[in-house]
Image (cartoon, grey):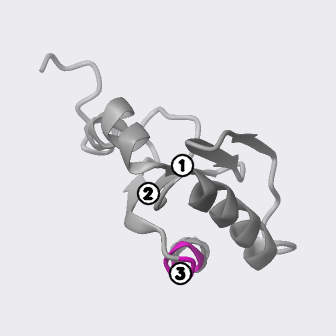
Amino acid sequence: MQNRIEKITGALDKYKAENIEVFDLKDKNYFVDYAIIASSLGSKHTLALLDNIKKDLKPAENFNHIDESSDWVVIDLGDILIHIMTPEYRVKYDMESFLSTLADGKEGMPL
């Protein structure tokens, strides 16, 4: 699994994604084992990252589903979920807080 994570984060870094974060969610009552979040440089870069990631990771990875817009792309690899967002969307939706809470095992605790 660690090799897969490194390959994914390496590809994101290679194509200039920023602020790449990996969340270990194994045994945390979430539907994937890992979530990866990365920022794009803007709308066009978001879609370019998707295209480049697909080229780099296929055929080794099975892309179950992809939801895409120019501001936020979600790639479902089954046990890994990749979020690529514009900086504005990343701030607006603050997925880091949610995933950090899950990863730290504090789900359901009051803030």
Tag 3: residue type?
Answer: Gly
Which residue in the protein does label 2 denote?
A: 39
Specify the label residue 7 is tagged with: none
Q: Position of residue 66 (x, y in %)?
A: 75, 44
* Quarter holding residue 7: bottom right
| Quadrant (top left/top right/bottom left/bottom right) for the C terminus | top left
Residue at image mark 3: 10
Q: Quadrant of residue 39?
A: bottom left
Measuring from the top left, give residue 70's x and y in whole percent: 63, 44
Q: Is residue 14 above or below residue 40?
A: below
Disc 1 designates what residue? 83
Is the residue 12 above or below the residue 84 in the image? below
Disc nearer the start of the sequence (3/1): 3
Nearer to us of marks 1 and 2 is 2
Is 87 on the left-hand or right-hand side of 111? right
Residue at horizontal 19 percent and vertical 20 percent from the top: 109
Give the percent coordinates (x, y) of residue 49. 64, 65
The residue lying toward the viewer, choosing from 15 and 66, is: 15
Magenta residues span 10-15
Q: Secondary structure at mark 2?
A: strand
* 31 sits left or right of 27 in the view: right
Tell me the quadrant of the picture where the N terminus can be found: bottom right
Distance of label 2 from label 3 (alpha carbons): 14 Å
